[in-house]
Image (cartoon, rainbow, N blue to C red):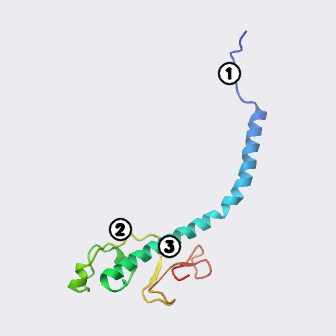
Amino acid sequence: MTDNRPRAFTLVELMLVIVIISVLAAMVLPRLAGRTEQAKTARTKSDIAAIGLALDLYELDTGQYPDSLDDLLARDAPSGLSTEVRAKWNGPYLKKGLPKDPWGRTYEYKKESQHKQDYDLSSLGSDGQPGKDDVTNWD
């Protein structure tokens, strides 16, 4: 005689699976918890390098760094440039637009560096205040 009843998991089996998943999660989650800030910092460093490359290309074509990061987005050369320099224009230098940092703020740019660089480019980090968690092109 065959048993035609559908087979199902018992409550004990389900509880055992839940306990196993809970133990695994308790071991793995603490290791991943601190990685979010590290990932955001790594992305910020990558963005600063990419924007820095665009700034350097702009300077190679025009002989000077832009007054603001928005100048990297222009399709046409600024009107204040000579005809010779305008002929070398290869803009826009940031084709996908100006990224925001991982915390949703704009990158800070200063044409005149205060840190013995060609320019200053930075993010204020997670707290949005100048301090130790800043990501910069001069460190």
Residue 132, picture quadrant = bottom right
Mark 2, other Cα within 10 Å: few <14 / some 14–19 / many ≥20: few
- The kind of secondary structure element at disc 1 is loop
The percent coordinates of residue 31 (x first, y second) are: 69, 59
N-terminal-most mark, 1 or 3: 1
At x 55% / y 69%, what residue is drawn? 42
Q: CA distance from mark 2 to mark 1?
A: 60 Å
The percent coordinates of residue 130 (x first, y second) are: 58, 82
Residue 87, picture quadrant = bottom left
Mark 1, other Cα within 10 Å: few <14 / some 14–19 / many ≥20: few
Q: CA distance from mark 1 to mark 3?
A: 57 Å
Residue reaching furthest to the front: 60
Which of the image's four quarters has the C terminus?
A: bottom right
Image disc number at residue 95? 2
Question: Residue tagged by mark 3?
Answer: 105
The amino acid sitting under disc 3 is Arg
N-terminal-most mark, 2 or 1: 1
The amino acid sitting under disc 1 is Pro
Which label lies toward us, 2 or 3?
2
Q: Is residue 132 above or below residue 38?
A: below
The amino acid sitting under disc 2 is Lys
Residue reaching furthest to the left: 83
N-terminal-most mark, 2 or 3: 2
The percent coordinates of residue 97 (x first, y second) are: 38, 69
At x 28% / y 72%, what residue is drawn? 75
Image disc number at residue 6? 1
At x 74% / y 54%, what residue is drawn? 27
Residue reaching furthest to the right: 12
The percent coordinates of residue 67 (x first, y second) are: 37, 85
